Image (tube, rainbow, N blue to C red):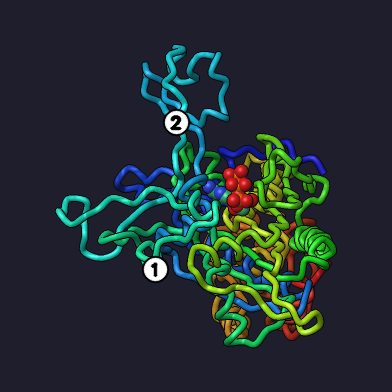
Amino acid sequence: MENPTVTLDKIVALCKRKGFIYQSASIYGGLNGVYDFAHLGTLLKKNIRAEWLKSINATFDDILEFEGGLLGPHAEWEASGHVENFSDPMVDCLNCKHRFRADEIDLSKPCANCGQTKWTDIRQFNLMFKTQIGAISNDDPGFQPSLTAMADTVAQGGVYPEKNRGAGHGKANIAYLRPETAQPIFVNFKNFISTYRVKIPFGVAQMGKSFRNEITPKQFLFRTREFEQMEIEWFCKEETALKDFDTWCESRKKFYSNIGLNMQKIRFREQTPDERAHYSIRCTDVEYEFPFGFKEIEGIAYRGNYDLTQHSKFSGKDLTVFDEETRKTYTPHVVECSVGTDRLLLTLLFDAYHEDIQAVPAEAFGEGREQETRIVLKLHPKIAPIKAAFFPLVKKLSVPMLAIYKNIKKLGYEVDFDESASIGKRYRRQDEIGTPLCFTYDFDSENDNCVTVRDRDTTIQQRISIDIIEDYIKKTLTKG
Ligand code: ATP
C-alpha cells in the first residue's frame, strides 16, 4: 500500500503536537541528538518492548532477561575492540566549520552548507562517550592518561597487563557509556551459567540504553546520540549456529509482520563479506523503506565465538563450557539480533501515518467545511499507545460514561476519556494518536444499555452492549 503523504517533517510535528516526543532540554536550546519521550511516546515504546520480548520467548526456550550497567570499564571496551575501532571518518569544512561524516559525502563536491570546497583531512572519530569513575579529573596531578591500546599485544599472544584489568587503567578510572547493549551480556556469561545452571543453547535478552557520540545525528529518532536497543545474544554450539541464525531470521520476520508493519517495505539484506565485521560469519540487515531510502532497522549477526574469546583473553578468566557428549571444553558461538527501539518506533510511525480526505458532516466541524483531511495513525491495536477512548455525547452524560471508562481502566487498559468539543473533533484527536476504538454514550444508552463503537481505520460505527466492551477491546487487540 503506497503512502506518499508521509514525510519526516510531518512525523516530527505530530510527535511534538500530540505529546509523543520532545527535543531534550528544549528550553535551553535543545541537546542535539537527544530526545525525551512523553506520555504517548513512552506507552508506545512500552508496547514495542512487550511485543519484542514475547517474540523472542516464542522463538526458543531458555531465554534469560538482563539489564546490564550503562557504564563499563576501559578494559571491557578494549577487549570488545571498541576503543580501537568504534569510529567513523570525520571531515570538517575549513570555511564554515561544518562537520560531516566523510563516508556520507562526496569530497570532490562543495560543502552543502557554504558551497566552498576546502576540506580538512579525514580523521577517525571514536563514537564512545568517555568518562571517569570517582573524584579524579584530568587536572589532578595523579591523573595518567589511558595507556595505549593493548589489543595488539593480546592478539600476538601476549598477556593483558593485570593493572589494566578491572575498573580502569592506572590511577584514573576511565569508563565508557556503553555504545551497544551486547558487551555486558558477554562479560556476565559465566555468571549466567553458574547462577541459572542454563545449558547451551540459551539466550540473554536485554532492552536498554546505548550511547554513541554520532558525528551527525539526523532524521529525528533515526540517528541519535542516546538510544535504546533490544538485543538477544543466543549462545549455541558451532554445529547449530547457522541453522539457529536462520531460525532467528524467520522469527524476526514474523515479529515485524505481527506488529503490523507493511512487509512490502521490509527487506532482509545479507551483508557482503567486505561489509561484515572481520569476526562475523553471517550478517543480515533488516531494512525498511523510509521516504529517504531503504535503511537498517535491525542487524542479525552470527559472530562466531569472537566476543567470549576476547573477554577471556583480556580478563584472564575462563569462559569456556564443558560438553557432556564430547567430554571437551569449548567456547560457545553467538547469534545476535539487535534492533533500535527508537528507530523501530520511528519506523512504525512512518508506516502508520495516513492522511485521508473525508467528506465531513457540517454539524461536526461547522458550516462551510465539507472536506477535511483526517490524519490517522494506523498502528496495530496492540502497539497503539491508547487502546480505546470513551466519550459522552454531551457533558450531561459524563457521569455514566466516566464510570464505564474507570471500570475498563481498572482492568489495566490504557484508555482515554474526553468530554470536550464535538464528537467529530474528539474522533480526530484519537485518530491522530492511533487509538483503534472510540466508544460514545448517547441518550439512547440510558435505555438500551448500549454504546456506539467507531473503528479508527474504517470509521464504521456499530452499536454494542455496554457489557461486552471489554471483550470487544480484547478481540481488537489480538486481531491478526
Ligand atoms: P548504522 O549503520 O545505522 O549506524 P549500525 O550498523 O552501527 O547502524 P548496530 O551497531 O548494528 O547499528 O546497532 C543495531 C541497531 O541499533 C541498528 O540497527 C539501529 O536500529 C540501532 N541504532 C544504532 N545506532 C543508532 C543511533 N545512533 N540512533 C538510533 N538507533 C541506532
Q: CA distance from mark 1 to mark 2?
A: 30 Å
Q: Residues within 10 Å of mark 2 (few under 14, many from 20)?
A: some
Residue at 58% across / 41% down in the picture? 10
Which quadrant would the N terminus be assigned to in this image? top right
Callout 1: helix, strand or loop?
loop
Instruction: Kindly report which numbered mark, 1 or 2, lies closer to the viewer in this rendering.
Output: 1
Check disc 2 and give the amino acid type.
Arg
The part of the image, by quadrant, that contains residue 43 is bottom right
Q: Position of residue 294 (x, y in %)?
A: 71, 39
Residue at the left extreme of this rendering: 141
Residue at 73% across / 50% down in the picture? 283
Q: Which residue is mark 2?
A: 123
The part of the image, by quadrant, that contains residue 197 is bottom right
Q: Residues within 10 Å of mark 1 (few under 14, many from 20)?
A: some
Q: Is mark 2 within 8 Å of ligand 1?
A: no
In the image, 353 versus 405, the foreground residue is: 353
> Closer to the N terminus: mark 1 or mark 2?
2
In the image, 338 versus 360, the foreground residue is: 338
Check disc 1 and give the amino acid type.
Gly
Residue at 60% across / 77% down in the picture? 65
Q: Is residue 208 left or right of residue 213?
A: right
**Does residue 400 lie above or below 100 as drawn?**
below
Q: Which residue is mark 1?
A: 166
Q: Is residue 53 left or right of residue 109?
A: right
